[in-house]
Amino acid sequence: MSENKIPYKIYLSEDEMPRAWYNLRADMKVKPAPLLNPGTHQPMTAEELEGVFCRELVAQELDDETPFFEIPREIRDFYKMYRPSPLVRAYCLEEKLQTPAKIYYKFEGNNTSGSHKLNSAIAQAYYAKRQGLKGVTTETGAGQWGTALSMACGYLGLECRVYMVKCSYEQKPFRREVMRVYGASVTPSPSDTTSVGRKILQEFPGTTGSLGCAISEAVEAALSAPGYRYVLGSVLNQVLLHQSVIGLEAKAAMDKYGVKPDIIIGCAGGGSNLGGLIAPFMGEKLRGEADYRIIAVEPASCPSLTRGEFRYDFCDTGMVCPLAKMYTLGSAFMPSADHAGGLRFHGMSSILSQLYHDGFMEAISVRQTDVFEAAEEFARVEGILPAPESSHAILAAVNEAKRCKETGEEKTILFGLTGTGYFDLVAYEKFHNGQMQNVIPTDEDIAKSLAQLPEVL
């Protein structure tokens, strides 16, 4: 199909929505290493995991072989409220950059939670409800996941307790209030409501918190409340499975118009949106059917892929969660209080870590002032105020498009625009006022944290 017939926004019909999630692990020759029991360092059994997670989600977490999981009708019906999401051709950005590159982005911000997180939140809440549970606990960094889970629980009539990283809790009071609109309780983390929270506050007085801290508190709260389970918004295999709807829709929309991306870019914190976006494309790459250049973009303040080690580590600061083999800065690493709260996790999804380790994808780290410059450039020409997290992908896409201008190459770029920035205006204000700093950990900072990694034979 000729280029001038490709619309600004490509929408699939409801009938073209994915009816099954794609399990990328089924096509990985080297599977992600198993989760380990923190006490015995043996692979976690389903029975052990079911004490923390919902039964059906445990089955999804442990399954490395089944390529597709049918999406239950109730979840598909919920998806229809905001899916399929649009694939957008960034014509205005291309014109602004005067690049021969063709730029597309998959926009996941067209729901009240403002991000892609709702794709997994409704799935996890659904399985909790079907199991007969009373409620769930979770953590949230920037607030997108907590908002999404609050929406899903409100819809299904489940109780929801959210531990929100303290710096985001203070920076984003309106994000917190949206969670409360949907019936969730929200606690700044670390807090004095849990034993692990009190321990962290004693060890790190005045800390602004981290996702690792909040995870520890949420797990403890779930284990101490009958009828509750813990749910997680990123990192885990089950989450990347649910988020595969992003990539499945993006690929279907591109295939519809005969478009094949050369470069696929996503921001990377725990890995949920990047893993979801690249899933079907990476599947083709693993099967030898096609090739793509895939780039993970992480903050220089929390560079797990680019400066971490591929080791077993705790997923949480309190060291109560299972051990995961991943690229990590160490569970004791405390990232600076920058404004990409959803990317402030010390580790990375085991799936993405294994793919990166095996050379199937690249990773770069970028400074937050550069990120906000790209965010404003994008907002002024494309009309969407992006979240700081998504803006990491925007920056990388813009840089690749500029490189195409220098070389004359007509590359096709696809990136994930996973959220809106309307709750991030404090960050934009600091950027405008020249108060935003680039705090990048030293080698000594990282070495100190890595020295505390557990020894796993």
Image: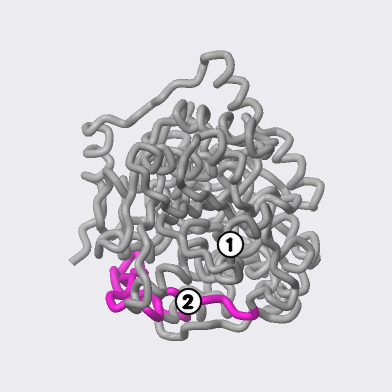
- Magenta stretch, main secondary structure class: loop
Identify the residue shown where x is 51% and y is 47%: 195
Three-letter code, disc 1: Ser
Q: Residue at x 38, y 46 (%)?
A: 346
Q: Nearer the viewer, residue 320 or 350?
A: 350
Residue 31 is a magenta residue:
yes
Q: Are dots 1 and 2 in contact, CB under 8 Å?
A: no
The residue positioned 52% from the left and 71% from the top of the image is 241
| Image disc number at residue 2 | 1
Q: Nearer the viewer, residue 287 or 407?
A: 407
What's drawn in magenta, residue-wise? 19-47
Q: How far, Cα to Cα, is label 1 from label 2?
A: 33 Å
Determine the secondary structure under disc 2. Answer: loop
Which mark sits nearer the N-terminus, 1 or 2? Answer: 1
Q: Residue furthest bottom?
A: 66
Task: Give the left or right position of residue 39, taking residue 244 as reference.
Answer: left
Element under disc 1: loop
Question: In this orientation, does residue 242 appear?
Answer: no
* Disc 2 target residue: 23
Q: The N terminus appears in which quarter of the rendering?
A: bottom right
Q: Nearer the viewer, mark 1 or mark 2?
A: 1
